[in-house]
Amino acid sequence: MAMLELENVHTYYGNIHALKGISMKVEKGEIVTLIGANGAGKTTTLRTITGILRPREGKVTLNGEDLSQFKAHEIVYKGVSMVPEGRGIFGRLTVSENLDMGAYSRKDKNFAPDLERIFNLFPRLKERRSQVAGTLSGGEQQMLAMARALMARPQLILMDEPSMGLAPVLVEAIFDTIVQINKEGTTVLLVEQNALMALSIASRGYVLQTGTIVLHDTAENLKKNEMVQKAYLGME
Amino acid sequence: MEKEKSFWRIAFERGLVAGVILLLISLIGMLEAFKGREIIGGLFTMSQVLIVGTLYLTGAASGKLAQNNLRQSALGAMLTGAVGGFTTGLLPIIGTLVNLRSVLLNASPELYKILSFGTGPYLGLVVLTIVGALSGLAAVLLNLVKGWPRQAINNSLVAIIMLGLLADLFRVTIEQWGNLSVLLSWMLAIKGLSYAGVAAILAVTFGLSYLKGRKPAQAGSVSIFQQKGPKKYAAWLAAGIGLLLVPPILGVYFSEVLDNVGIYILMGLGMNILLGYTGMFNLGFVAYYALGAYTVGVLTSPETSANPIPWIAAMPVALLVAIIAGVVLSIPVLRMRGDYLGIVTLGFGEIIRILAGSDLLKPWIGGANGITQIARPGIALWLTKAVPGFQIQQTVYYVILFFVIVGIFLSIRLRDSRQGRAWMAIREDEDVAQAMGIDLVNVKLLAVIVSSALGGLAGALFAGRLSSTYPQSYTLMVSLNALCLIIVGGMGSIPGVVAGSLALVGLPDLLREFGEFRMLVYGALLVVMMLVKPEGLLPAEAAKREFHTEENAPAAAD
Ligand SMILES: Nc1ncnc2c1ncn2[C@@H]1O[C@H](COP(=O)(O)OP(=O)(O)OP(=O)(O)O)[C@@H](O)[C@H]1O
Ligand SMILES: [Mg+2]
């Protein structure tokens, strides 16, 4: 049984048909990437998984359990964390307070080991613990958004374009961290426009075009695929 | 050269602005309203303070544009002041030539007399221009004074104007002290402050500023209330005793004003939880207030109830009614945001007011006649009887004070709780807050419950204080007041609610001339606040950070 499974999911904004029957699977321990151009429906897919949007047709299951019975805020209690598009940090709260918010769903209050792990992954955040998150640099905000998602101790982490707006060096650092997080046992669904980077760390990938999955293969094969090369890797 | 030219031009334009402001406050009747308020007896009135103050402040603003060139700065400020004075001085001349009165009600000979400082219209033009130039010059020269003397000058000016404005109340207050009134009566002239009083204020402000200025400013100086150890307890104890002594020392009128301030503090605390913490906009806050007042009225007045119950028994019911209304009215709008929520809640507020005055409900709640003979809080009645000379306004003060303290305590506890953090997360980003596991509906409902309870409590106190309630007390103004006071005080700040209530409810009550111009002063104050201190008088931590991020850069440790 797959950890996360979407079966023929249709999602609408009013009468705009944004997702037109998407099916995909993420197995435990994997990094899976969902690539696509602007407006393809990547964010919509993630919002449908986390229950902010409801599919009009089809279903989303987590370890075999239908997620439609849960409200949006309950999804995190099921072990799914989100790194939202555009980071979505709480700009007026400090770094520490943001991390506390990340742990909002937890019953236990023993955050010390999590903080240690996070500050190992992102030493920069440790220095800036008491800084107001809104004044962090873009890269630091991205780190904070990832760190905050980890505070919930998720089994599955959904990331929406973590490379957006970052310098190439930073993108590499962020992707290294994603691999690290994955190695430590968290399954990752990575939404990206930066297909090259995403495919270099993922095991499998889905290509989304205007609400439809047009390709699905291993990352290796996708990198070699002519259409992917043309449309997403900028090769002729 | 290019730059210099633009400086003169700006100074000139600012002068015109000053003139327009003065003409405006003249023609709406504000100058005339204040002509009787002598600040220093026999020397100058509040009208003159407004004229000179406007010219002084605009002059200072021009002077600051050329700070490194004293001559230019002084000349610029004088130009601004003179242009402002000249523009204003034209009004009496035009007024004597043409009859403006048929169009502009307030363009009276009395006004012209004020504007020309008692001289005729033509001489007045000269006088006003010179006064303007001198005000500008004074502003620049004063700006040269630095450190504690500067602080002392500013403080003494504010103190003299405030005490001068309140001189009448001051007199009424000390007269209640009987023989003890001689202790302070020398500070007052027949109208306004006496010269001796002014000298005393100067001595005190200069003395205090000197003492304070000598001490090296501590880094991030904390108020004494936040310091650790016995000093803190002593400060709180002193503040507590001070609050308890207000009714006997300051008398009936101040107590009455503070009763009103306290009621608005409770509403402000409620509004603060909704808007300041959770980011929910509510323009119908008056609905909770009205429901609280009417519930107490209906249950405790023999006019409306066969078995009237005491205030204290009706109060919890009032809270319950307000809470139920809050929750029921919120269910359809919980998903709305910002302006929509504001408009819908505005409608609720109006509906409640109209229902209260309607003939439909008249048999139960009195319609336009309202409800009278409402029970007052028993303890206040008892105190009024037990302490000779105490009026109901003074004893109700203690009841209101008690509930204000409870409200503040509750607000602090909630703010620092898990719920409080959830509110702030929602305010920042609802979707992300949900992804953190925050149940939007529950958390918002809790905010609605607490705030409507505070609104209902304020209403219950309002009805119990006056012993009557009428539909016309529950206008949109109540909601707007509660909104403005948290904006002025500082969104999301509990001390800000108190400061905002004192400034927006207390001050206008003390100065009855302001009554008419309340909305104008509010508007002007809000604009000035947004420009000068957008975070409010006593901002919350988070707002300080938002508006002064550059000062917040971390001490980068690598
Ligand atoms: N709130 C909304 N209301 C109406 N239409 C929307 C809304 N949000 C998204 N859409 C539409 O749904 C489609 C998919 O949008 P989505 O945000 O999922 O794209 P995306 O793949 O995440 O794009 P990007 O890479 O730019 O983030 C787009 O056509 C978009 O215009
Ligand atoms: Mg997107």
Image (cartoon, rainbow, N blue to C red):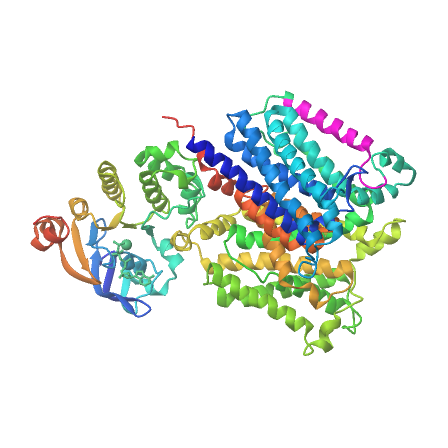
Give the total of numbered labels: 0
User: Mostly what secondary structure, the magenta segment?
Assistant: helix
The answer to whether A149 appears left or right of A97 in the picture is left
**Is residue B153 placed above or below B119 in the rendered structure?**
above
Query: Viewer-proximal residue, B532 or B265?
Result: B532
Query: Viewer-proximal residue, B279 or B48?
Result: B48
Residues in magenta, as a range: B190-213
The answer to whether B24 appears left or right of B394 in the picture is left
Ligand 1, seen in the image, is in the quarter at bottom left
Query: Viewer-proximal residue, B466 or B38?
Result: B38
Residue A28 in the image: state x and y as whole percent: 23, 51
Which residue is drawn at the image coordinates 79% and 42% (left, top)? B167
**Is residue B484 placed above or below B556 in the rendered structure?**
below
Q: Is residue B512 visible?
A: no
- Residue B202 among magenta residues: yes
The answer to whether B486 appears left or right of B189 in the picture is left
Residue B286 in the image: state x and y as whole percent: 63, 62
Query: Viewer-proximal residue, A199 or A102?
Result: A199
Which residue is drawn at the image coordinates 17% and 56% (left, top)? A207
Q: Is residue A23 visible?
A: yes
- In the figure, residue B241 lies in which quadrant? top right
- In the figure, residue A20 lies in which quadrant? bottom left
- Residue A43 among magenta residues: no
Residue B498 in the image: state x and y as whole percent: 64, 46
Which residue is drawn at the image coordinates 49% and 56% (left, top)? B443
